[in-house]
Image: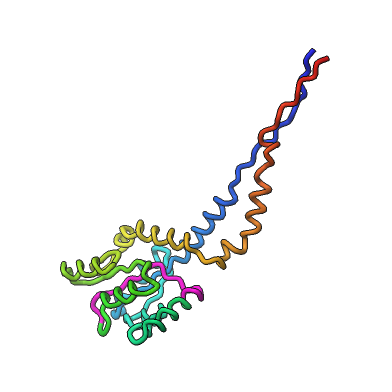
Amino acid sequence: MLFWRKMELKPQVPDTASEQQQQQKQEQHEKHFHVLAVDDNETERKILEKILSVSSCQVTCVDSGDKALEYLGLVDAIHNDSASSSQSERSQQDGLKVNLIMTDYCMPGMTGYDLLKRVKGSSWKDVPVVVMSSENVPSRISKCLEGGAEDFLLKPVQLSDMKKLQPRLLKSLHQSCKTLPDNDPFTTDNNSSNKSKRKALSPEPSERRPKIKELTVL
């Protein structure tokens, strides 16, 4: 007679730790999507700040291109390029994150185009820059787009404009997620624990594919 020895197969547990970690990381960055808004007109700044806040963005407003450069650590760029570069790198290392720069074109002193060129010539060159203006001047628009602007918006800026920009903003967000520093709390603090979780959740090969023992002949 032939007898089968009954064996219990343990269900395989899917390894979802890495997917959960990636989702938490993206949600955290979406909550802190930071926009630097530059406009010398106080009313326009308030309108832009309100629209960005409704879009769940963190907003920092300044009233001139010079203050924007100062915030980015590029204040010495006009006089000393090497000093400006090192100061900008220190600002980024200190945790300053800017995911988007929105600047007015017509401002006293430094124009939005001038600010655009300074940003694109610095360590912040990968940050999207959107230029705004109340004047629809084709040559001005072309100059900014050719200079590296992500888009050119006509004032007053509306919520629908931000929705149109959303795909590009998400692209910038994903790029920043991929280039997170090693000391990011989502990558460093949980690094060892995530490895152990994956190890614990993944069953041994012998459990995933148990071998049927030989038949016993009586």
| Residue in the foreground of this view, choosing between 123 and 137 | 123
Q: In which quarter of the image is residue 206?
A: top right
Residue lying at 35% horizontally and 56% vertically, measured from the top left: 167
Q: Is residue 19 magenta?
A: no
Q: Which residue is drawn at 39% across and 61% down?
A: 172
Residue 18: give x, y in percent of width and height. Answer: 57, 51
The quarter in which the N terminus is drawn is top right
Q: What stretch is highlighted in magenta?
A: 92-107
Compared to residue 187, the image places residue 47 above or below, namely below
Q: Compared to 21, does 13 lie above or below? A: above
Above or below, 34 relative to 209: below
Point out residue 10 in the picture as x, y percentages from the top left corner: 70, 35
* Residue projecting furthest to the bottom: 79
Residue 105 screen position, x and y as percent: 25, 75
The answer to whether 4 appears left or right of 68 in the picture is right
Residue appearing at x 47%, y 74% in the figure: 92
Of 14 and 159, nearer the camera is 14
Q: Is residue 113 left or right of residue 181?
A: left
Position of the C terminus, as image quadrant, is: top right
What's the image's color scheme? Answer: rainbow
Q: Vertically, is 77 above or below 215?
A: below
